[in-house]
Every structure is written in structure tokens, then in C-alpha cells.
């Protein structure tokens, strides 16, 4: 994963444990055939695609009330 993408995504999802979970779930969806919601001229790893989707506001998350995210 690219450090600049991680830093930018951390501004949106400040909890690193939540960020890891959001990225890993999205990577799983991409591996299963979901189309990326961002376009890139360069070849990106699936983790980087997920990070870019977070940065560009294409995916979000919601925590269940009363539950600890990790």
C-alpha cells in the first residue's frame, strides 16, 4: 500500500482498526469481481484502489451503536 494513500485515508477514517476493516472488506469485494469505483492511469494494487475509493468518498462505513469496532 502506498503511504500517501494511507495518510489521506486516515484523515477520513481516523481509527486505524476501522480503516483496515473497511479496506479488507472492499478488497474482498474487488477480488470477487466488483468493479472499482475509481479510475487510474496506473496499475494499482487492490488495497490502493480501496484506499482511493475511501479518499474520493466512493465508499463509507457505519459502526453499529454500542459495539466496539475491534
Image (spheres, rainbow, N blue to C red):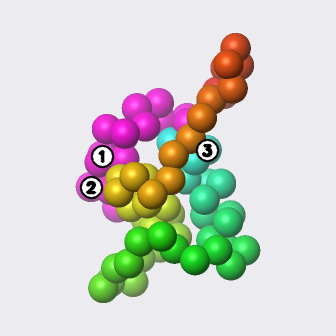
Q: Magenta part of the protein: which range?
A: 1-18
Q: Residue at x 62, y 29 (%)?
A: 63
Question: 10 Å neighbourhood of mark 1: few (<14), some, or many (≥20)?
Answer: some
Q: Is residue 23 left or right of residue 51?
A: right
Q: Which residue is mark 2?
A: 4
| Quadrant of residue 1 within the rendered picture | bottom left
Q: Which residue is mark 1?
A: 7
Q: Residue at x 37, y 39 (%)?
A: 12
Give the alpha-carbon distance from disc 2 to disc 3, as whole Å: 19 Å
Magenta stretch: includes residue 53 = no
Visible residue check, residue 11: yes
Q: Earlier in the sequence, mark 1 or mark 3?
A: 1
**Could you tell me which secondary element the residue under label 2 belongs to?**
helix
Task: Give coordinates of residue 5: x percent, y percent.
Answer: 32, 56
Q: Give 1 or 48, whichever is nearer the viewer.
A: 48
Question: 10 Å neighbourhood of mark 3: few (<14), some, or many (≥20)?
Answer: some
Q: Which residue is mark 3?
A: 21
Q: Is residue 17 left or right of residue 5?
A: right
| Prevailing secondary structure of the magenta residues | helix
Question: 10 Å neighbourhood of mark 2: few (<14), some, or many (≥20)?
Answer: few
Amino acid at each position: 500500500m502506498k503511504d500517501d494513500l494511507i495518510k489521506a485515508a486516515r484523515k477520513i477514517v481516523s481509527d486505524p482498526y476501522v480503516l483496515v476493516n473497511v479496506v479488507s472488506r472492499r478488497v474482498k469485494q474487488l477480488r470477487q469481481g466488483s468493479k472499482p469505483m475509481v479510475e487510474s492511469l496506473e496499475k494499482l494494487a487492490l488495497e490502493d484502489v480501496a484506499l482511493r475509493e475511501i479518499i474520493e468518498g466512493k465508499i463509507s462505513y457505519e459502526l453499529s451503536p454500542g459495539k466496539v469496532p475491534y
